[in-house]
C-alpha cells in the first residue's frame, strides 16, 4: 500500500497485517458453498482477498473513499467482490443483497472498534438472515458480547446476541498485529444463528425492556424499570423465581422474553 497513506482515527483504522491470522479467521468461519459474505472495513483488503477465495460473493463496505484507487487496482481481476464506498450503518442492506443469488449469508470482518455495537444492532434490528457472524473486535467488547447471565460483562447487547445466536470466543489477536498499533488487544468471536428462537410476541417491547433493565448497571430492576407497571413485572418474575431486587445481569434471556410476553 502507498506509504503516504494517512490512517484516519475518525474511521477507527487499524489494519491487520498478519496473513496467517487472516487465514485462521476465514478457516474458523467454515464458509459453505454458494455463500455471500458481508464485510465491513476492508482496509488494505487482506481479509477481503482471503474471503474471496472461498465465498461466491463478497460485499465489502468501506466508508473511506480514499482507499478506492488502491482497492480497485488490487482486485481489478477479482469479479466476485463488490466494494460499496459508503457507511454500512446508513445502507439498506436488504436492497444491497437483492441482485445476488446465494444460499448462505455470512458476516466476516475486522470491525472498526468505534462502530462494533452499532453494526451488530443494525444486523439484529433489521433481522437480516445471517447464519454466521465472525468478527474481530476489541477484547473487552468481545467478552461482553459472549457473556452469560451472572457474569459482570453481561449487558443488553449480550442478551440480544444470545437471543439470536450461539456465541463462541475463538482466539486473541495481539495489538502488535495491526498498523497502526491500537491500545488494546483484539479477540475473534463467532455467532451462529440458533435453529429455534424463543417466541417473542412484541420485538419492540422486548428490545426496549432489555435496554431499560440495564440502563443503570448497579441498580436493581425495581429502580431501572420504575416507569413500568412494577406489579405486573413482579408477578412475572416470581413465576421465574426472581424478584425486583435482582439486577438485570442476573436474568437469563428466557426471563426477559417471559417479562416481555407477559407484560400487556
Image (cartoon, helix red, strand yellow):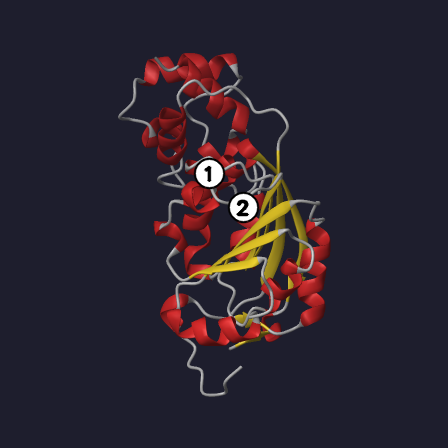
| Total labels drawn | 2
Q: Which residue is mark 1?
A: 124
In the rendered structure, the answer to whether residue 74 lies left or right of residue 115 reads right
Quadrant in which the C terminus is drawn: top left
Q: Nearer the viewer, residue 115 or 37?
A: 37
Q: Is residue 50 something that shows in the picture? A: yes
Task: Measure the C-alpha gap from mark 1 to mark 2.
Answer: 13 Å
* Callout 1: SS: helix
In the rendered structure, the answer to whether residue 18 lies left or right of residue 233 reads right
Within 10 Å of disc 1 (Cα), the crowding (few <14, some 14-19, many 20+) is some
Q: Is residue 22 above or below residue 239?
A: below
In the rendered image, residue 30, in percent from the top left (x then y), is placed at 72, 48
* Callout 2: SS: helix
Residue 131 sits in which quadrant? top right
In the rendered image, residue 91, in percent from the top left (x then y), is placed at 37, 49
Q: Is residue 201 above or below residue 49?
A: above
Q: Nearer the viewer, residue 32 or 152?
A: 32
Q: Which residue is mark 2?
A: 145
Q: Is residue 262 above or below residue 16?
A: above
Amino acid at each position: 500500500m502507498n506509504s503516504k497513506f494517512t490512517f484516519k482515527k475518525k474511521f477507527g483504522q487499524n489494519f491487520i497485517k498478519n496473513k496467517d491470522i487472516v487465514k485462521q479467521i476465514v478457516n474458523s468461519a467454515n464458509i459453505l458453498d454458494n455463500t455471500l459474505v458481508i464485510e465491513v472495513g476492508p482496509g488494505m483488503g487482506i481479509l477481503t482477498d482471503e474471503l474471496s477465495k472461498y465465498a461466491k460473493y463478497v460485499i465489502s463496505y468501506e466508508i473511506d473513499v480514499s482507499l478506492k484507487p488502491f482497492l480497485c487496482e488490487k482486485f481489478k481481476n477479482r469479479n466476485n467482490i463488490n466494494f460499496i464506498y459508503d457507511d454500512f450503518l446508513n445502507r439498506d442492506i436488504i436492497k444491497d443483497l437483492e441482485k445476488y443469488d446465494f444460499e448462505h449469508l455470512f458476516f466476516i470482518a475486522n470491525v472498526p472498534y468505534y462502530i462494533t455495537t452499532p453494526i451488530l444492532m443494525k444486523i439484529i434490528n433489521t433481522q437480516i438472515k445471517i447464519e454466521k457472524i465472525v468478527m474481530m473486535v476489541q477484547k473487552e467488547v468481545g467478552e461482553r458480547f459472549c457473556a452469560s447471565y451472572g457474569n459482570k460483562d453481561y449487558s443488553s447487547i449480550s442478551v440480544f446476541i444470545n437471543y439470536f445466536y450461539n456465541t463462541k470466543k475463538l482466539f486473541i489477536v495481539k495489538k502488535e498485529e495491526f498498523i497502526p498499533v491500537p491500545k488494546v488487544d483484539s479477540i475473534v468471536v463467532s455467532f451462529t444463528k440458533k435453529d429455534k428462537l424463543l417466541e417473542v410476541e412484541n420485538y419492540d417491547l422486548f428490545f426496549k425492556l432489555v435496554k431499560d433493565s440495564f440502563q443503570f448497571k448497579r441498580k436493581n430492576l425495581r429502580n431501572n424499570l420504575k416507569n413500568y407497571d412494577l406489579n405486573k413485572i413482579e408477578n412475572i418474575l416470581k413465576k421465574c423465581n426472581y424478584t425486583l431486587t435482582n439486577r438485570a445481569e442476573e436474568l437469563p434471556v428466557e426471563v426477559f422474553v417471559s417479562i416481555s410476553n407477559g407484560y400487556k
